[in-house]
Every structure is written in C-alpha cells, then in structure tokens.
Amino acid sequence: GIATIDNHREIRVGYPEVIYCEGKTKEQISKIVSVMLKKNNNILGTRASREAYEEVKKICNHVEYNELAKTIVIRNKEIKKSESYIAVVTAGTSDLSVAEEAAITAELFGNRVERVVDVGVAGIHRLFGKLDIIKNAKVIIVVAGMEGALPSVIGGLVDKPIIAVPTSVGYGANFGGLAPLLTMLNSCASGITVVNIDNGFGAGYSASIINKL
Amino acid sequence: GIATIDNHREIRVGYPEVIYCEGKTKEQISKIVSVMLKKNNNILGTRASREAYEEVKKICNHVEYNELAKTIVIRNKEIKKSESYIAVVTAGTSDLSVAEEAAITAELFGNRVERVVDVGVAGIHRLFGKLDIIKNAKVIIVVAGMEGALPSVIGGLVDKPIIAVPTSVGYGANFGGLAPLLTMLNSCASGITVVNIDNGFGAGYSASIINKL
Amino acid sequence: GIATIDNHREIRVGYPEVIYCEGKTKEQISKIVSVMLKKNNNILGTRASREAYEEVKKICNHVEYNELAKTIVIRNKEIKKSESYIAVVTAGTSDLSVAEEAAITAELFGNRVERVVDVGVAGIHRLFGKLDIIKNAKVIIVVAGMEGALPSVIGGLVDKPIIAVPTSVGYGANFGGLAPLLTMLNSCASGITVVNIDNGFGAGYSASIINKL
Amino acid sequence: GIATIDNHREIRVGYPEVIYCEGKTKEQISKIVSVMLKKNNNILGTRASREAYEEVKKICNHVEYNELAKTIVIRNKEIKKSESYIAVVTAGTSDLSVAEEAAITAELFGNRVERVVDVGVAGIHRLFGKLDIIKNAKVIIVVAGMEGALPSVIGGLVDKPIIAVPTSVGYGANFGGLAPLLTMLNSCASGITVVNIDNGFGAGYSASIINKL
Amino acid sequence: GIATIDNHREIRVGYPEVIYCEGKTKEQISKIVSVMLKKNNNILGTRASREAYEEVKKICNHVEYNELAKTIVIRNKEIKKSESYIAVVTAGTSDLSVAEEAAITAELFGNRVERVVDVGVAGIHRLFGKLDIIKNAKVIIVVAGMEGALPSVIGGLVDKPIIAVPTSVGYGANFGGLAPLLTMLNSCASGITVVNIDNGFGAGYSASIINKL
Amino acid sequence: GIATIDNHREIRVGYPEVIYCEGKTKEQISKIVSVMLKKNNNILGTRASREAYEEVKKICNHVEYNELAKTIVIRNKEIKKSESYIAVVTAGTSDLSVAEEAAITAELFGNRVERVVDVGVAGIHRLFGKLDIIKNAKVIIVVAGMEGALPSVIGGLVDKPIIAVPTSVGYGANFGGLAPLLTMLNSCASGITVVNIDNGFGAGYSASIINKL
Amino acid sequence: GIATIDNHREIRVGYPEVIYCEGKTKEQISKIVSVMLKKNNNILGTRASREAYEEVKKICNHVEYNELAKTIVIRNKEIKKSESYIAVVTAGTSDLSVAEEAAITAELFGNRVERVVDVGVAGIHRLFGKLDIIKNAKVIIVVAGMEGALPSVIGGLVDKPIIAVPTSVGYGANFGGLAPLLTMLNSCASGITVVNIDNGFGAGYSASIINKL
Amino acid sequence: GIATIDNHREIRVGYPEVIYCEGKTKEQISKIVSVMLKKNNNILGTRASREAYEEVKKICNHVEYNELAKTIVIRNKEIKKSESYIAVVTAGTSDLSVAEEAAITAELFGNRVERVVDVGVAGIHRLFGKLDIIKNAKVIIVVAGMEGALPSVIGGLVDKPIIAVPTSVGYGANFGGLAPLLTMLNSCASGITVVNIDNGFGAGYSASIINKL
Ligand SMILES: Nc1ncnc2c1ncn2[C@@H]1O[C@H](COP(=O)(O)O)[C@@H](O)[C@H]1O
Ligand SMILES: Nc1ncnc2c1ncn2[C@@H]1O[C@H](COP(=O)(O)O)[C@@H](O)[C@H]1O
Ligand SMILES: Nc1ncnc2c1ncn2[C@@H]1O[C@H](COP(=O)(O)O)[C@@H](O)[C@H]1O
Ligand SMILES: Nc1ncnc2c1ncn2[C@@H]1O[C@H](COP(=O)(O)O)[C@@H](O)[C@H]1O
Ligand SMILES: [Mg+2]
Ligand SMILES: [Mg+2]
Ligand SMILES: [Mg+2]
Ligand SMILES: [Mg+2]
Ligand SMILES: [Mg+2]
Ligand SMILES: [Mg+2]
Ligand SMILES: [Mg+2]
Ligand SMILES: [Mg+2]
C-alpha cells in the first residue's frame, strides 16, 4: 500500500484526514481519495494541481477545484455554518491565494468566513476602514508577505486571537517568506500565533477549532 | 521621557501593557512601574532580574518575584479564575522556566492552569498517563526544546487548539531553539500554532484570549 | 579519462563502487558502467534519469529501472538474502521515493527488507499497529519529511539502531529538508543516527553493514 | 604606526573621521585622539567604554561621555544648528541607546534633532499623537527592534525620507536584529532605506548629509 | 474585490500607488490599472512581464514597456524635470536592469537622471574618469552585484547621500545577492543607506524624495 | 514535581534514562538522582558541572566525576565488558573531551573501548599507523572538529559502521561545528551516519546498541 | 553604452579583462567582444551559453567553444607555455566542468596544465597512485564537491600552494556548495586558500599568477 | 597520550607542525611543546593565552609571547630572511591583531615582511600613498573586517597573488566576519584567494610557500 489512512482521526480530533497533494502523483492522490470516499466524508486536498483534480474527477463527478487556492473539495455531507465568523485579512493582492486556502478550509469545516482584502500597513487608513469587520470576528487570520507587518498592527487594536500566516510573496532579502515569518514571530503585539509560510490550510484549521470552542 | 505608556491598551485589547524588562535598566523599569501603579492595575514584568525586582520593591512592597520564570508580579485587583482551564505541558525538566512564564501570565489574566511536566516523546507512555488532563483543557500550551516533537504527537490526539512554544534548550545543531521552532512550524499534525522561541509570555497571553472566548 | 574507478573498493569495504548519476551526462554514466561490467559485479546507479537508463540499456540488456526510486540496477551475481531484516519505515506517502532508494540498496546488498508505510506521528495509533514488525528488525531506517518527528517516537520504543533519513518533503520553513534534519540531529531519544537529506542510498548502505555484523 | 588618520576626509566628504572604538585598546584610542586633536576639529568616538573615556580624559579635559549612547565627544569648534530638523523616533524604551547614538552624531554635525520615544506599532495611537513632529522633520530616523514594523507604518504616512535602524533588541528568532533588518529591507512602504543593525551612528550621519542638502 | 487601491496615497506621501506586478495574474494587473486610470495619474508597474504589458495595452493604448527594466509606464500628466539630478551608477553590465528600474522610477517622478555605467572597483580608474558626474549629483544611487564594494569606495569620495542597491548578480557564495547586501550594510564609509536586493524601484523612489527636498 | 522519570525505559530500550544536566539546577539534578537511586541502576549524567557533582556526592558517596568529559557516573551494578570493541578515534587533541563522553557512555553500557588519538587528515600517515586497531573494531566512532574530514577517509578504508561526531572545535566559518557537521552529512564515503555536534553521548549510545547486536 | 571596457587592465595586472557572460544577453556579449577585438588580444568568456557562442561566431570566425567548461575562447596572439606546470585535480567525475574552466583559463594565460581526475578521498589509494604528478606541480588546484575533503588530504602531503575550489555538486545539506566551501575554509592542513563555489576561472587565474612568479 | 605529533611533517610539507592552542589546556600545550623541543625546531603556537605562555616558559626560558597576535614563539634555529618580501596590509586599526599573526608566522618561516596599516577603502588615497610597497611585494596579504572591500580594490591594481583574510571586526549584519568573507569570495577582481575568518596564521603560511617558490 502507498498510504495508511487515518480513518480514526475524525473521532480523535474532530476532522477527517486532509490530503497534502504536493509530491504525490495524481494516481496516488486518486487512490487515496477512492479509499476515503467509502467513509462518505467531506474531502479536502490542498496544493493540488489541475491534473490531480482531473484525475480525481474520473472517480468522483462532484469534485470541485479552486484555481487560486489550489484546493480539491468533495462535499458529501451538508455543512452547517457557524454563527460567529472567522475574518481572513490579506495585506496585498498577491497574498490572495494563501488566504483563499485558509478560507476554503474554514468554510468546509463549517465556519462562516469574512474576507478583508489588501489592507497592508503601507496605507493604514485602508485597515481602519475595515476594522469593524475584523473586530467582530471570533478569530482573525492575517495573511501577509513582503515584511509581514500587518498582524502586529491589528494585534494592537483587537482583543481576539490572531493567527498570522507569512507568505512567500516578495524577493531578495525576503528569502522565500523568512522575512515575514520572523516579523510575525517577533511581534511586540500580543495575542498573535504563527503558522508555516504559505500554510493557509493550517491557519484555517486552527481558526476553525477556536471558532467552535 | 523614556517611555510612552499605552494606558489605553486595556480598553482596546482587554489587558494592560506588560513590561519586557530585558535591555532596560532597573531604574527605567522602576520608573515605568511607578507610572503604571497610578492606574491601580495588576502589573506584570517578564525577563526580569532579581536586581530589577529589588528596585521595584522599594516603591511597591507587595511585588512578587518568581526566580524560575523571571517574572515580577504586582496584584492590585482581585483575579477571578476561569472555569475552563489551560493545560501547560512540558517535554523536559529544562523547559520548566519557559512554561512557568506562560502559566504565571495566564493565571494573572484570570485563567485556571493545569501543569503537566516532563512528558516528552522519548518516553511516550508518560504522555498517555496524563492525556486526560490535556484533553479536557480548553487550550493547550506545549513547551519543548531539543527537537520539539511533542506538539506534533499531542496534535494528533486532541481536538483543542495547541500553542507550541519552542525553547532554547539544547546544543549544537539546535541553534538556540531554531530546531524546535522549525519542527513546530512544519508539524504535519493540524491545530498547532507557534510563538517565538522561549516566549512563554506570548503563549500564556494568546491562550488566555482563547480561553475567555 | 573521465573517472578513476575504484575497483579495489569491494575488497576494502565489502561493496563495489556505486554510481551517483546526478550531474553526469548519460554518456559518462554509460561509459562508467561499461568499465564496471568487466568485473561482473552487481551494479547500482542512484539518482538516475530515465534517459540515463535507456543509454545503459544499449550496452546491457538486463538493466532494471525503478521509476520511484530513480535507481538503475544490474544483477550479475546471485544475491543471498540475510535472515535478519531491515525495517524501512516512512512517515508519509510523499516520502516513499527516498525510502525505496534505501530499500533497493539494501536488497541489492543482500538484505531482507520489510516496508512499513505512512505511519507518521499525526496519527500515532497507525505506528502502534505496526510496532511488532519494527521491533523485530535488526536495524531500522526511518524516513520522514515535514517536521521529521517519527524517529524520536520510535527511538523511545525500541532497542535497535535507528538510521534517520530526513526528506525534502515540505514547504516554507522546511527549507528543503533542513527542518527534519535538525529534528533528527536533536532527537532526545537515543540510538538515532542521521544521514543527509534524501539520502536513501546512504541509509540503505549503513543499515546493510550493520545487519551483516 | 597603528593608524593612518584620514586628515583629508573633511575636505572630501564634509566631516572629519570618526573613531570606531570597539576592538581598539584604550591606549590605541587615546593615541588616535591625540593625533586628531592637532587639527582642532570636533571629535566623535562611538561604541566607547567608560575606560576608554577615562583614558582620553587624561589628555583632553573637556571630553564628554554619554553612558546610554556609549559616545565620546570633544567639542573644539562651535556648532551651528540647522533650521530644519531630524526626527529620531524609537519603537520602544530598549531602543533608546541606539537612537541616542544617532541623535548625538546628528547634533555634533550641526543638526537640530527632535526625539519621539516609544511609539511602536503595538499601540499605534501613540504614534498618531506625535505624527506632527514627525511629518514636519526634513529627514526621519526610525529605530526599532523586535519585529521592526514601525518604519513601514510611518512610511505610509509621510513624504519625507526615512532611515530605518534595526536594533538587536529581542530574543529567540530575532537572531540579534536579523528579524527587524529583514522587515525594514522588505518594507512595502516606499521611501525607506536601511542601515546596519544598531548603527545609530550611520543613520545620524546620513540624515545629516540629507538635512544639509 | 481583489485590491483596495490606496487613492489617498498621493496626498499623504506625494506619489500615487505603484503596482508590484510579480505574483499577480495579468488579469489582476489590468483590473488594477483600469481602476487607477480613472484618477488620470501617471501609472507605474514594476517587475512586469511582456504578457502583462500586452494585457494592459488592450485598455490603454499609450502604455510603454521597458524590456530591460521590466516596467510598465503610463504617462497621463506632463512630468517636469528637476534641476538637480540623481546619478545612477552601476558596477557592471549585468546590473543594468536593476539600475534601469531605478532610473525609470526617478524619471517618472520628475527627476533628471544621469547614468554612469560599468565602473566597478576591479578597474577603479574607470570610476575616477566619471567622478565629476557623480560628485555633482544631489543624490547618488549605486547598483552593484558580486561583492558589492563600489558604494564603499564612492562613499569615501563624495559628500552626497548614497543609496546602495545590491543585485542578485553572481553565483556560489553570493547567495542571491546576500553577499553585496551584507557588504553595503557593513560599509565603513559613511553616508550610505541600503535597500532590498534588486530593489531599483525603492532606490529610485527614495532618491526622488531626497532630490525634491 | 519537576520530572517524570521514565522508569520503564530500561525494559523498552535496554538502558535506564540518562540525565542531561545542562540547564538544570544542581538541586534538580540531585533530586532526579535520588529518585533513580531507588532502582539500584547504574546512573549517568552528561554535561555536568563540578558543582552538580558535588551536590550529588552529598547523597551518594561513590559517584565519580570526569573533568574532561563532564560526566557524573554512579556504578551500582557490575558491568560485564563485551568481547568485540568500539574504536573511538579523534582527529585532534581538542576533540578529546567529546570523545571521552562517548567512551565513558559506551564503557558504562558494557562495551570494551579502544581509543585512537589525534590522527587527523593533515598528517594521514598517523592514521595508517593505527589502522589495524580501527579495522578490527565492531563499530567505529570518529570525532572531528575543524573541517571534519576524518570520517570520509576512514569510511573509504574499512567495512564497519562509522558514527561520525562533529565537534565545535574551530573558529570563524566553522560556525560552532556547522562546518564538520555538513562535511560528515555530505561524505562521499559510504557507511557513515552522523549525530549532533558535540554529542559524544549519542555516539556512545548508538555504538553500544550496534556492538551488542 | 552598456560597458566601460578596462583596456588598461593588461598593463596594470598582466591580463586583459575577461567576460563574465552569465546575466548578459548574447547581443551584449557580442558587442563587448567586438570592442575587445580591436586590441588584438586573446579573449576569454566564461559561463557562456552555446547561443552566446554562436552570436560571437558571426563576428569572429575562429572563436572556440568548450561545451563542458562553458567557455568562449578567441586566440589572436601566440601563447607560450610555461616550463613549470599547474596540476588540476578533481575529486569526482561530476566536478569536471568546473575543473575544465580552471584548466582552460590557465592554458590561455600561458601555463602548462596537468589534469588528475576522480581521486576523491572515498578511495584514497587512487590519490596515492597520482601523487607524483601532483607533487611536482608548481601550484595545485583541487576541485571537489560533496563534502570537499580532498584539499585537506593533499595539503598534508605536499609543500606547494593549493587553491581549493568547492563545487555545487551534491544535494540536501550540501546547500549548493556551502558544505565543501566551509570544509575548505576550515581545513586543518596548511597552505590551502579558497575561491568561490564553482569558480574555476578564479582558481585558474590565481594559479597562473603564482606559476609565473 | 593526548596527541600524535606529526614529526614527519617538515619533510613532507617543509614546515614543522604548529600548535593551535585554543581549546587546549595549558598543561596539554606545555606537554606538546616538550615533545617538540626534542627535535630542536623552531616552534609556533597560535591563539595562545598569556597563561599558556607562562606554563611553557617553565620548560623553555627563551619562549616569546606577542600579546597582540596571541602567539608563542620559540626560536631554536637561525632564520634566514628571504630577499623578496610579503606585504601585510590592513584595512583598519582593529584588524591589527590578525595581521600580526600572519606577519609573525611568515617571519618565523623565513620571509621578509612589510606592514602597511589602516588603508581601508573609506579613504582610498591612503592606499594610493602606499601602493609602491604593495606592488613590489611577491605576495600580498590583505586583512579586512567590516565589509572587507580592500582586497577587491588592490586586486584591480596589482599583478601579484593576493591572500585575503576576513576578520570578525564589526557588528550587526557582520555576523562575526561572514560579511567580509562573502565579499572576498565574490570579488570581481581576479587573483584573490581567501582563508578562514581571522586566520592570520593560514595566510602567513600560504604566503610563505608562495614567496619561497
Ligand atoms: N497544505 C498543508 N500544509 C500542511 N499540512 C497539510 C496540508 N495539507 C494537509 N496537511 C496535513 O498533512 C497530512 C497528510 O500527510 P500525508 O500522509 O503525506 O498525505 C494531513 O493529515 C494534514 O494534517
Ligand atoms: N545517492 C547517493 N548519495 C550519496 N552518495 C552516493 C549516492 N550514490 C552514490 N554515492 C557515492 O558516490 C560515489 C561516487 O561518486 P562519483 O565519483 O562522483 O561518481 C560512490 O562511490 C558512492 O559512495
Ligand atoms: N558605530 C559605527 N558604526 C559603523 N561605522 C563607524 C562607527 N563609528 C565610526 N565608524 C566608521 O569607522 C571609521 C573608522 O574605522 P577605524 O579605522 O577602524 O577606526 C570611521 O571613519 C567611521 O566612518
Ligand atoms: N519592485 C518593487 N519592490 C518593492 N516594492 C514595490 C515594488 N513595486 C511596487 N512596490 C510597492 O508595493 C506596493 C503595492 O503592493 P500590492 O498591493 O501587492 O500591489 C506599492 O504601493 C509600492 O509601494
Ligand atoms: Mg495592494
Ligand atoms: Mg526528563
Ligand atoms: Mg498520510
Ligand atoms: Mg514601550
Ligand atoms: Mg564590466
Ligand atoms: Mg594534533
Ligand atoms: Mg568517481
Ligand atoms: Mg582607521
């Protein structure tokens, strides 16, 4: 076998296993999906190519593909939306793809999501214009590349948990997202925790657990 | 002046400003405390030396010092404990000082805290023996140095948000905590977010916000 | 000449030279194989492209190619299998290609190999289900990417030598396998030694020496 | 000889040579000062210990020492203050010593300096309260440690050149000032240029040249 | 929406928002341009591909593309040239593309620019031959890859502010421009500030602010 | 409590828990020893200061301290020596302290040890003079700092498993042992596995497991 | 102009300027060659693509291209060979392309070159078989990737200056040649100096200067 | 024994073994010296503390100590000075101690040495004033910290081999000498080879071999 599916996971941690598609062949992905389909759960694949999606479509007609987020989604069970919501905030237009991975993950796991787009610190009034949506969320995901300063500023303005997601958007001494990662880890604002560079999925997942508390 | 105290912070984010004592002289610390005392809030200083504590004691008799956590605490207002609790879990004995900073922060902010000590992955049955305390927490702080694998293992066993704190415990290719930091950021278990190396305070603060949701 | 073949190596260290194909042209590889064929040994080429394989096939019809492991194998002498076996354990599906390089190396050098697939720490019960196969091996190779925590957990459960192989599976702050490499070097479980990132060959080779002791 | 004093520098670049005291013995420093005194210029020594200062005092009675900035200053010529001023802004109290090195350098070179203290992004209203002083400067020096986000925010609010100075204030994944250095280099606000970590002197010098344009 | 255009920026900082095209689709870029066109400003897009340019050309016929600098420029308002000028100096031929990004930015913002090409330190007499043009500038941009020593040498010869731009030209232990970046940050010549690797835009922008003082 | 002693470990992995003394107070160490003494096992503490040793001596008179290796050893049970032996080879005199930690660990765990001292590659004939002792070992530990080339050379000469230990001996671009660590991980000789920088204990432990196979 | 050719260099340092082709367009390269042709010197271009070569061929029929070394050579003046020779030694087959760049540079500058191929430390008897050729050289260039241990071993055996060239051959923790670079810089053998990763040209050039002394 | 003295080295490589004193106890050093004294050679110890010197003085009265260079020297045989000389050039006063280690090494090995002090690029006319001494040397050692640009400039002006020595003089993004090390490795001037950070000894040794050719 190529995989040992963790069928027991939903019972243990509340959600079924998610397929990390990068570095797997489309055949491997399709095979894993076929095993998971037997449990009739909703299925999520992240970092999936269009080719992988097309392979899966052969065995499951209602699979959906999000080009921006690179996600494969199969909805087999109805999803009830939470009352409280998660705000997904991006610093720039280029961070949208990571933010969308977070939003789709959160939505599939039954959370209401509000998107706030392109409010980076270089034009801070843009942030103030959207502050209410952000403040009224139960959890806030902040996605930022370049220098990644946005979570620090928001952290000083709200009393909600912030999950900061550094992105690999940038060049030169950005070092593939290292710059915003360090920024977020060293934030002098409190209430900020951090996930891996470009890990929209992880942020959406953690936000979901917190939103459901 | 040497500081612009953020008196407004409690209103904005729910907690008064906390004093980061490292790199400040004992006179600077004492001066900042004296200004904050006027507001009659509870006061927390982190990474404080015994000398700083003694300087502060001159102007505030009921200040407390925790040698292990290197914290200065002044209690001016009664603290009501939360019903739900935060679990603070450590991988090894050497991680205790960071864990204690987290626990003291959380307690000062009104949270009940349960400590689980020295249950690192090298003897995983020790973890299983304490799993109930961990599972029943509302939020879990996991403190680990060396390779920092403990959050990954706990992450696969519980459905609560985990805040992982890498410590600088280790040597050689540990690079002052870089090894466990990377481990935690790359965890293939979900539901884990990360704070800076040795940042017990940040973990306690974030856990507190979540526990109060 | 383009190479100085180490014909004497088998006498010195017990195994003939192995061809590291990366960074060599297919003509260079074929030329080296042609020289080695004269000694009638079994021949192994690692990190070989399909093109290199096809070039070699022109001069040696019974050459085999493993797409997953990227190995070229020529069997000229019968291989006797060892009684004791080497366990090759992977944390995830994406680590299979490195694991297969290790397994093929070990098998070509006359070792029995047992494969245990996709038992990473995020679902630790999967590991417990396979623990017997692992415990009864004479040597254990553990292949893991992402945060690479699996060797630490196994190290706390068995009394056999573990060779840990970090893989470059992951993204962001994984830094091409640096994260699991550091994890494994800093393991607080004992009995673990480490080889280079993605070096399945090296793990298979060392395991073989130990298994033959 | 131990040094080749650049007596010609004032003519070429407008200011006499400055003594970088770190890594020089107090005898070497005193010897260099004694040579420079012959030119009757104002003399600046940076990163000087109290011991070095006391050694210099033996040969020049009117030398001044600034404990916070670690500077030695000898005023031999009257200094005319510029009309326009340089704003020196700090994110936190712990950045004061680097900021003071910048301010003293600028003042000795004939610039009016306005200090704005402790207005970091975690409490951004503090910044807005001082924005007028900052906006009316001809050049702005922004000194910040931890994640170093302050220059980005100011950069989005003013139309003056900003010289950003990362400090080594912080711990863990701050890596001795690497975190704020990368933040400042990657800033998505424009008009920001950067000097070395803790290089208050360099910032004061560059600001001075610009202020005199 | 995909973007929150900062229409207010020109009032705040003196220049309209600039489009950073890398990591945006050509459709996103065109959409942002279409919104900005309504304000009748001059528009600048950096790091743009020819494809992006052609997409924009569909909605704005007079857009210009510079192959070397990878810039998109739309001139809607007349640009008055400054009397004083900015010198843009390059160490080698391979640094020309970054230098051109700086020059185009500066020119679009109304500055006179003088270019000095290929005067790196390996043949220092070439620099002396052009020193007059450099000395008479109001601000100097120095663009250099490899070891990036040119700003240090110029810094010792002039009394004007120098903005140093490290480029990613080089190989091996150049680490994508890290070598010249560190060189420039550590320069023992004074009056040098630094921008990100390959950030011609940032250098042109800062130089423009200073030239207009 | 400050620790959860893993009393079960000897049954699981064959050896009792070892105390890593760095970062523990002498009181903590003494307390852990006192608990372990109840099981009447042999006890090993690594990276122990003389102060820790003296504290332990108060509760256990027959404790031994090795100044060079920084080990605390308590022998409660007789140790039978293995027939086959482990060779502990050092490249230079400065590597002796790490080598001694390895040797003491191996001896306490019942292995015969042969020491080969100061045979680094700069004078390779020294190695050839001792090659017989090395070749006849069952496992070989090679300890080297500076560039750490010795394991590669030995790896090409023997058919036994080699455990390479990089040390932090060196300066400059050695980066605290990073240089020899990378050398050993990248060795083109086969049969070499690596432990953490300065991890003599880990090498002794792994060698012991292999020697007992 | 795109370049300021250093026509004066031959007089100053003994050799004409060499064209570093990477990062230049074929048109730029051809233009630079056309200017240099006027001086009737021998011309060398390094890191040149076949396309660049073909462009140059249009203006100079007798240009030669070396596929392995990626060099363009134009011989306009007779080259007298030195009596003493430079040895160019490679550790493995994959290092040949860097070694050839060194050899071609040295030969064009009038040096006799002896090549010794594939004598890396994993089979050290191969080195001893060629030691005479190496010992009798006036200067020795040693080219090695992977862990780069060969210069250390040769350094302990000869009394001639060694120029060590690390190559980017390797994977994983090789980090693009960083591993052998550090090895060579930290060598405990004396008489070794180092050039940049893959810098065959630089080694050939320096060796040439020394051989001509 | 604690060491295997390489008595044969003088025959092989022309010079007796040199004692690297860092990380050795004074007793170890004295013991090694006592063995070497039997051969009646000149003896050199580098990176020696005053304590080590005093220990050695007990067994050898005519030992000399250089405080600046941290060298121990014992002259037992007359040293004939070479006709041609080595130039040892420093960029700043703080680099003197590394330069002196180089000079003493070279002198002990029989070379005439000319010292040129404090001629760094920030005041380049200082270099031109000393260029004749530099040009007439047979080999040139250039010692520089901070950004380490001096070798590049000299490399463009002379036709002699240059050995560049980066020093750890600097702070912040100097990273203990990494900045000048990278500068020197990436130099676009030719004829430069590099030794480890602060490795004055290695530079003096290599220069000596070349000077004797
Ligand atoms: N984008 C992602 N980033 C990090 N972890 C992920 C991502 N997508 C899925 N995962 C985790 O990776 C696990 C599957 O790994 P594997 O066994 O290699 O398929 C899932 O259970 C998830 O917890
Ligand atoms: N995948 C691999 N990783 C590391 N080393 C290898 C690998 N494959 C072969 N080797 C080693 O590389 C040596 C050959 O290197 P070369 O002379 O460049 O062909 C062989 O003798 C093996 O010991
Ligand atoms: N704190 C500082 N940081 C960076 N450069 C400095 C500093 N103080 C002085 N310098 C520069 O260092 C030069 C002196 O270096 P040195 O010859 O080593 O004394 C001066 O001319 C200044 O340009
Ligand atoms: N080449 C560049 N490098 C760095 N920053 C840039 C560059 N081009 C534009 N910018 C900045 O990036 C901002 C736009 O980012 P975004 O919202 O992602 O389009 C602009 O306002 C500029 O300040
Ligand atoms: Mg935007
Ligand atoms: Mg423990
Ligand atoms: Mg899996
Ligand atoms: Mg403050
Ligand atoms: Mg040029
Ligand atoms: Mg020795
Ligand atoms: Mg080979
Ligand atoms: Mg000086």
Image (tube, coloured by chain):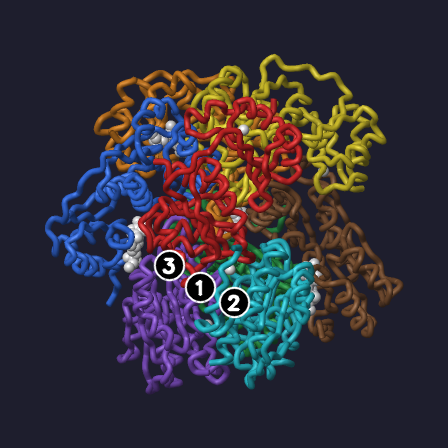
Chain colours: A orange, B yellow, C blue, D brown, E green, F red, G purple, H cyan
Q: Is residue H97 left or right of residue B166?
A: right
How many residues crowd mark 2 within 10 Å: few (<14), some (14–19), many (20+)? many
Residue type marked 2? Glu
**Residues at marks 3 and 1, CA–CA distance in whole angstroms:** 22 Å
Spatial separation of the CA atoms under disc 3 and disc 2: 28 Å
Q: Is mark 2 within 8 Å of ligand 10?
A: yes
Instruction: State whether residue B26 is above or below residue G38.
Output: above
Residue identifier under label 2: H17
Q: Are marks 1 and 2 in contact (CB under 8 Å)?
A: yes
Helix, strand or loop for disc 2: loop
Q: Chain of mark 3?
A: G
* SS under mark 1: helix
- Residue in front for this viewpoint, E127 or E22: E127
Q: Position of residue H15 (x, y in %)?
A: 50, 72
Residue under the point 63% across and 46% down: D151
Give the residue at mark 3: G145
Q: Secondary structure at mark 3?
A: loop
